[in-house]
Image: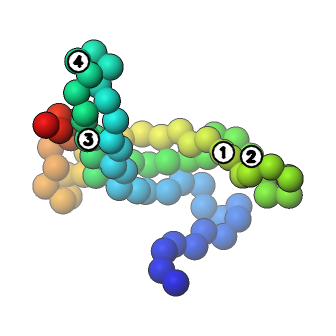
């Protein structure tokens, strides 16, 4: 098994690489957005005892990862 384990109530933030794909609603083009470094925090409680699927929100900040050569907090690319 690979991945990352986080023990409950011990980590207040997660530093992550984030990649999103979608559509630019202004011009209808497919896009890719890469955020080399995002600092994410939970925006509410996580109810693991409920009978529904677990859902939770995250809020965060994009950080310019200059230690790894990036000069901006995200990269926007239109996919053709």
Residue 30, position as x, y percentages in the image: 25, 33
Q: Residues within 10 Å of mark 2 (few under 14, many from 20)?
A: few
Q: How far apart are marks 3 and 2 (CA)?
A: 30 Å
In this view, 18 is above or below 2: above
Q: Which of marks 4 and 2 is in front?
A: 4
Q: What element carries label 1?
A: loop
Q: Residue at (37%, 50%) from the top-left corner?
A: 18
Q: Earlier in the sequence, mark 1 or mark 3?
A: 3
Q: Is residue 33 above or below residue 37?
A: above
Q: Name the residue under label 4.
A: 27
Q: In this view, does 25 lie above or below 55?
A: above
Residue 69, how many percent across, how many down?
Answer: 13, 55
- Rounded to the nearest angstrom, the CA distance separating label 2 from label 1 is 7 Å
Cα–Cα gap, marks 1 and 3: 24 Å
Measured Cα–Cα span from mark 4 to mark 3: 14 Å
Which residue corresponds to mark 1? 56
Image quadrant of residue 31?
A: top left
Q: Camera-side residue: 19 or 61?
A: 19
Can residue 51 be seen? yes
Outermost residue on the top side: it is 26
Label 3 secondary element: strand
Looking at the image, which residue is at 28% across and 52% down? 36
Label 1 Cα crowd, 10 Å radius (few <14 / some 14-19 / many 20+): few
Tell me the tag on residue 45: 2
Name the disc covering residue 32, or none: 3
Q: What is the C-alpha distance between the residues marked 4 and 1?
A: 31 Å
Image marks 2 and 1: residues in contact by CB distance under 8 Å: yes
Sequence order check, earlier mark of 4 and 3: 4
Observer-side mark, 4 or 3, equals 4
């Amino acid at each position: 098994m690979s991945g990352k384990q986080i023990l409950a109530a011990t980590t207040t933030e997660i530093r992550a690489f984030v990649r999103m794909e979608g559509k630019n609603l202004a011009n209808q083009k497919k896009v890719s957005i890469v955020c080399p470094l995002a600092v994410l925090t939970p925006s509410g409680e996580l109810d693991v005892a409920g009978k529904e699927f677990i859902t939770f929100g995250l809020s965060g900040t994009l950080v310019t990862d200059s230690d790894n050569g990036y000069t901006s907090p995200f990269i926007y690319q239109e996919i053709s």
